[in-house]
Amino acid sequence: GNSVTQMEGPVTLSEEAFLTINCTYTATGYPSLFWYVQYPGEGLQLLLKATKADDKGSNKGFEATYRKETTSFHLEKGSVQVSDSAVYFCALIIQGAQKLVFGQGTRLTINP
Amino acid sequence: DSGVTQTPKHLITATGQRVTLRCSPRSGDLSVYWYQQSLDQGLQFLIQYYNGEERAKGNILERFSAQQFPDLHSELNLSSLELGDSALYFCASSPGATGSPLHFGNGTRLTVT
């Protein structure tokens, strides 16, 4: 089946630190890959996406590269801010499928 | 603001009761998805409706049901509630039948006591 595995949280970093949140996937077809972010008290928001191998999605200083050879889509940011504190979800969807499959989420806390 | 509206924001009820959660999708979106977010199960897909018809079913219990009305708003009905049903219930919408891109509402927090 299709599944997404994220690194377990919580992750706690200091402001301006480098961030990596690992995400690997298993898919029966050709997935598109996504990162969603959930700020406290809010719903999930699309952060970035990549639809084919070697694509790089980027937004708000975050980046993730679709690596087919390692079935990964790790989220990175060079210098995190307190405002980046949130829960991050990696997700995939198979072409033509009806639903996103989410990872379990990684809670990120950034301390000033 | 995602454009997806969910009501109520919070709901507290007792075991055995029945509740209805409501969702209005983004303007122009034809698909509505329901997700359950709990601490131990993460984000679980429940069900999808597209233009009034059920399109896909996930881990939805028989005690739960949903529908999408002609004006495209959707309702999720939860009955014979159990303590374990306490969770955040999210609605999301997308323009077409496939789940991309998804726009989420802010959720309804259900507490069953």
Image: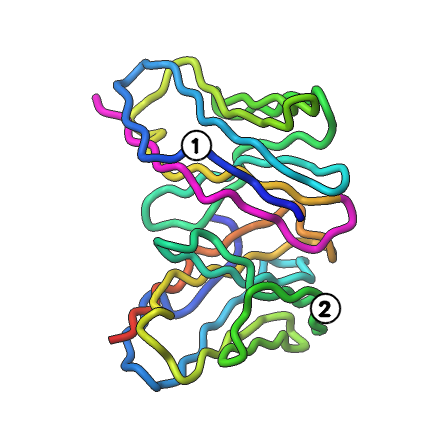
Mark 2 secondary-structure assignment: loop
3D distance between C-alphas at marks 2 and 1: 37 Å
Q: How crowded is mark 2: few (under 14 residues within 10 Å), some or many (20 or more)?
A: some
Residue B104 coordinates in the image, percent (x, y):
51, 52
Drawn side of residue B47 relative to residue A14, left or right: right
In this view, A108 is above or below A92? above
Rendered-image quadrant of the C terminus of chain A: top left
Residue A51 coordinates in the image, percent (x, y):
71, 32
Mark 1 secondary-structure assignment: loop
Drawn side of residue B100 relative to residue A91, left or right: right
Residue A100 coordinates in the image, percent (x, y):
62, 49
Q: In front here: A97 or B98?
A: A97
In this view, A36 is above or below B26? above
Residue B31 quadrant: bottom right
Drawn side of residue B65 relative to residue B97, left or right: left
> Where does label 1 land, which residue?
A7
In this view, B15 is above or below A12? below
- Number of the label disc, if any, that sits on residue B51: 2
The residue segment tinted magenta is: A95-112
Disc 1: host chain = A
- Number of the label disc, if any, that sits on residue A109: none
In this view, B7 is above or below A37? below
Residue A7 quadrant: top left
Task: Examine the structure image and report whether residue A104 is included in the region drawn in magenta.
Answer: yes
Q: Residues within 10 Å of mark 1 (few under 14, many from 20)?
A: some
